[in-house]
Structure formats: C-alpha cells, structure tokens
C-alpha cells in the first residue's frame, strides 16, 4: 500500500478515535513513520482532512458512475442505490464526528457542502426519465433535490445521529423508504394504493 493510502486510512482511524483532536504525532505513530516523512507527504493536519474529504467524494463519484453505467439495473434500483451510497470504507468512519469538522474547520466543511451540492445533472435526468416513464410520480425535482440535500447535511451534522442513537446508514435507509414509499399506508394513498 502506498504511503498516501496508508495516511488516508490512518487518518480515518485517528478521526474515528479522537475526532479533530488527533495530532500529526499520533497519526505518524499509528503509521509507524517519522513526523518528517508524514509532513513531506501532507504538510498539515488541514491537508490530511482535505485529502480524506477529496478521496471520500472521489469514491462516491466512482460508485455513482458505476450505477449510471449499469445497463442491467432498473431505473428504480439505480435511484435507490444513488440515494444510499456510502464510501466503501464506511464501516470504519464515524459520521457522528463530522460536526466537529464543521465547528473547527468551517472552510473544510464548506468543501463537503460543495461536493454534496454539485453534479446532480445525471441524477436529475434519471428522475425525469422515471417520471416520463410513469415509474415515479411527477413531482418538483428542484424541491426533491433541496429536501435530499438538507437531509444529507443534517445527517452529517452528527448531533442528530447521536441524539437519536442511529447510524448514518440506518437514517439513509429510512430516508429512502420515506422518499419512495411515502408515509401513508398503501390503502390510504390517493387512488387506494394505485399511485
């Protein structure tokens, strides 16, 4: 494994254990390298966080691309998968600590916000395709995008997850269920469950 990869995974472990309070000393110690070697690769702790954020969203974009280009997947399955993507190393990430980044490194949290807000064109096109095909009900896509963005950011706030004792994945699955199935039982939906 290349040093940059080791730093990436080591930083995730440090962040999970100590939040933003981890030090470059503790990261170097975890990796079994000198601080000098660490600083030659990443000049500061801010750069470490930026690397984690950039790689995280690169992984999300990779997964999105695979979903979009999967011709064997139904449109409904593509949408469900798109809205519940988590990074491939999600099992070692503690999303409840992301709010610490927002508080201590607001400029880095702004970068997370920009990643979440950007590159919706293909998802919106997929939603329109679903509406045109009659697979999903015709709704205002701009409102749906804002709703989902607010949910994503609220879940990344961390305090919501802590207060309600739920995981990021569980919250995303519940969100997906509400978006796709609504809150009314099938018998009480408009049209007696036919819509």
Image (cartoon, grey):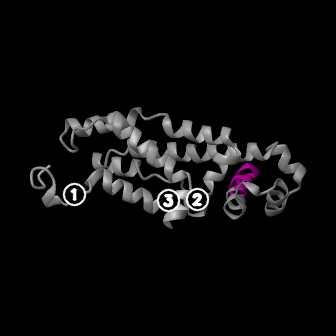
- Dividing the picture into quadrants, the one containing residue 93 is bottom right
Q: Name the residue: 47% across, 60% down.
A: 169
Q: Is residue 15 left or right of residue 115?
A: right
Which of disc 2 and disc 3 is earlier in sequence? 2
Can the viewer see residue 195 in this picture? yes
**Residue at label 3?**
168
Residue on which the image places disc 1:
184
Residue found at x 63% / y 57%: 97
CA separation, marks 1 and 3?
Answer: 24 Å
User: Where does residue 146 sit, x and y in percent of width and height?
Assistant: 41, 38
Within the image, what quadrant is residue 15 found in?
A: bottom right
Image position of 87 with respect to 46: above or below: below
Within 10 angstroms of label 3, few (less than 14), some, or many (20 or more) residues? many
Query: Magenta segment: does it hold 102?
Result: no
Q: Secondary structure at mark 2?
A: helix
Q: Which residue is mark 2?
A: 96
Mark 2 vs mark 1, CA separation in Å: 30 Å
Q: Earlier in the sequence, mark 1 or mark 3?
A: 3
Q: Are marks 3 and 2 in contact (CB under 8 Å)?
A: yes
Circle 1 sits in a helix, a strand or a loop, which is it? Answer: loop
Q: CA distance from mark 3 to mark 2?
A: 8 Å
Q: Is residue 186 left or right of residue 176?
A: left
The magenta segment is 2-11
């Amino acid at each position: 494994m290349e040093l940059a990869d080791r730093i990436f995974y080591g930083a995730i472990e440090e962040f999970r254990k100590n939040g933003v309070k981890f030090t470059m000393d503790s990261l170097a110690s975890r990796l079994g390298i000198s601080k000098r070697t660490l600083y030659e690769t990443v000049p500061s702790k801010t750069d470490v966080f930026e690397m984690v954020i950039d790689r995280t969203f690169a992984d999300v974009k990779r997964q999105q691309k695979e979903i979009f280009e999967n011709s064997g997947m139904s449109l409904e399955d593509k949408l469900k998968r798109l809205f519940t993507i988590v990074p491939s190393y999600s099992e070692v990430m503690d999303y409840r600590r992301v709010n610490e980044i927002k508080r201590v490194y607001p400029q880095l949290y702004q970068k997370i916000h920009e990643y979440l807000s950007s590159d919706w064109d293909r998802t919106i096109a997929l939603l329109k395709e679903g509406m045109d095909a009659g697979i999903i009900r015709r709704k205002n896509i701009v409102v749906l995008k804002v709703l989902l963005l607010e949910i994503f950011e609220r879940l990344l706030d961390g305090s919501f997850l802590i207060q309600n004792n739920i995981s990021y994945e569980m919250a995303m699955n519940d969100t997906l269920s509400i978006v796709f199935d609504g809150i009314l039982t099938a018998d009480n939906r408009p049209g007696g469950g036919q819509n």
